[in-house]
Amino acid sequence: MAFKPRDLSDSVTVRAAAKINLHLGVGAARPDGYHELTTVFQAVSLFDEVTVRPAGAVSVVTRGEGADQVPDDPAQNLAARAAVRVAPDSPVAIEIDKAIPVAGGMAGGSADAAAALLACSRLFDVGWGGEELVAAAADLGSDVPFALHGGTALGTGRGERLSPVLSRGEYHWVLAIAKTGLSTPTVFAELDRLRAKDGVDDESSPPPDELLRALASGDVERVASLLHNDLQPAALSLQPTLRRTLRAGADAGALAGVVSGSGPTCAFLCGDEESAVRVAAELAGGGVAKAVRTARGPVPGARVI
Ligand SMILES: C[C@@](CO)(OP(=O)(O)O)[C@H](O)COP(=O)(O)OP(=O)(O)OC[C@H]1O[C@@H](n2ccc(N)nc2=O)[C@H](O)[C@@H]1O
Ligand SMILES: Nc1ncnc2c1ncn2[C@@H]1O[C@H](COP(=O)(O)OP(=O)(O)O)[C@@H](O)[C@H]1O
């Protein structure tokens, strides 16, 4: 069924945030190829903006950070696939303004998909509630439900089953964005290879109970000491120079650093905003990353602006 926009001149813009995995426990590969995860997500203030307007055919134009690496083929672009999912017979022209690094482990494609879902559901008044949005999000990718949700959340299953997490206080981050990205399936496959080679069980690390307590009490230093990522050894194996980046962040005065998700972005938690600005300046001067950004979290999920 073709939907009519509320007004032919209508466009809707949605802003969606990047994420950092404060804890990423990876279990065994499942028969469907996905790994069982226990993860604590935090949405941080690095935003993509997605604008949709009615058009004769689906199209995608991307500007900003890493735009040349984003597919403009509607069959491949996650935002276009999301738009088609909402209104298959009502095509839209999509503009994406990217600040989230592409293939950076910060769920940029998922943010764009979540933004397009919300934007198209508003543009065409399709009558979807939260449940329909979340179901479509999970079909598009494991990280897409969190991109809708935002804030801080515990993810289980393949990462798509969310429960909210109580988090007090503000967290100040420095993000070191690498020159080349890492493909998520390649990093999971590298983890499987390393575990098989070392004869290590597929058991993920223990549940993040202490981290959840530290977040509830707003204890930034304790949170920093509990940052953990089972995918980090795989990301370091594929991009060994990330070790130097992690060391540089620690030397610059961050409380702790971790590879974000499947990497290669390294996220450094700092004691306060001033410290984050100092660490960012030092990392930028050290030449260990393509770009360095500061961000704070948690921030909300996808929102119409
Ligand atoms: C690793 C994480 C951590 O938050 O994020 P990124 O670092 O990519 O941002 C996510 O699990 C990524 O989620 P997302 O990027 O949505 O992945 P999907 O499209 O669902 O899956 C892409 C591929 O990654 C692998 N995959 C993903 C999720 C999962 N639980 N197990 C997996 O093995 C599978 O090979 C899958 O085919
Ligand atoms: N709208 C989009 N933005 C970014 N990447 C996209 C998009 N649509 C599809 N992709 C593809 O998804 C892959 C993963 O990108 P991204 O979500 O940025 O990284 P990650 O999974 O590491 O967080 C990229 O290599 C890119 O080719």
Image (cartoon, rainbow, N blue to C red):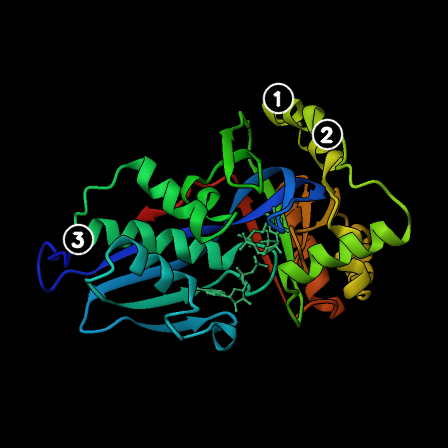
Q: Is residue 90 visible?
A: yes
Classify 19 as above or below 180.
above
N-terminal of the two: label 1 or label 3? 3
10 Å crowding of disc 3: few (<14), some (14-19), many (20+): many
Closer-to-camera residue (13/248): 13
Closer to the chain start, of discs 3 and 2, is 3
The residue that mark 3 highlights is 124
Disc 1/disc 2 C-alpha distance (Å): 10 Å
* Looking at the image, residue 211 lies above or below residue 4: above
Label 1, label 3: how many angstroms apart (C-alpha)?
42 Å
Amino acid type of the residue tagged 1 in the rendering? Ser
* Residue type indicated by callout 2: Arg
Looking at the image, is mark 1 or mark 2 earlier in the sequence? 1
**Number of the label disc, if any, that sits on residue 217:** 1
Identify the residue shown where x is 83% and y is 40%: 201
Q: Which residue is mark 2?
A: 222
Q: Are marks 1 and 2 in contact (CB under 8 Å)?
A: yes
Q: Give the image location of residue 274, x and y in percent.
A: 63, 46
Three-letter code, disc 3: Phe
Q: Looking at this view, name the residue that lies furthest to the front.
A: 31
Judged from this view, the residue extending furthest toward the left is 7
Q: Nearer the viewer, residue 48 or 157?
A: 157
